[in-house]
Amino acid sequence: MNAAMVKITFKLKREGNQIKGDYLCRPGNAICRNNTPHGWVTAQVNARGFRVAMEDTSWCMYFMDDFYPPKADGEYTCYMNGGIADQGTFKLKGPPTDSGEEGASPPAKP
């Protein structure tokens, strides 16, 4: 909100064609959206997006524009009480590799 950047963590696991896990607002953030530090992630493996249901009954949809595992970026929209509560962009980075870098480089484009 207001061009602020918040760091969050997703702890995900695959169960068949489903992805399930947790959304956690990382310690040290000035403020998490609506002061809600925890949520639950659900998605389909072949989908370009995922849903996060928050503790405060709001929910967010994240849609990936570019996806180069384990990196992605895109847009999100959060809803509460039937209306839009927040919108913005996001960047995902996978866990650090053995070399200490986060994620992998995207493949070269021809």
Image (cartoon, grey):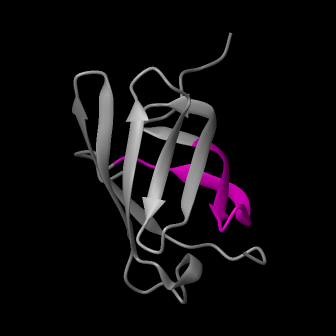
Q: Is any atom of residue 102 visible in this view?
A: no
Q: Nearer the viewer, residue 17 or 102?
A: 17
* 61 lies left or right of 42: right
* 79 lies left or right of 7: right
Looking at the rendering, which quadrant does residue 28 occupy?
bottom left
Q: Residue at x 51, y 85 (%)?
A: 35
Residue 21 placement (x, y as % from top left):
29, 50
- Confirm whether the magenta stretch covers residue 82: yes
- Placement of 23 over or under 21, stated as above or below: below
Q: Residue at x 39, y 25 (%)?
A: 45
Q: Quadrant of the N terminus?
A: bottom right
Looking at the rendering, which quadrant does residue 24 occupy?
bottom left
Q: Is any atom of residue 108 visible in this view?
A: yes
In the image, which residues are magenta? Answer: 73-94
Residue 29 placement (x, y as % from top left):
49, 84
Residue 3 placement (x, y as % from top left):
76, 73
- Placement of 93 over or under 37, stated as above or below: above
Residue 19 placement (x, y as % from top left):
32, 36
Q: Nearer the viewer, residue 98 or 30?
A: 30
Q: Residue furthest top?
A: 110
Majority SS type along the magenta span: strand
- Placement of 51 over or under 106, stated as above or below: below
* 100 lies left or right of 46: left
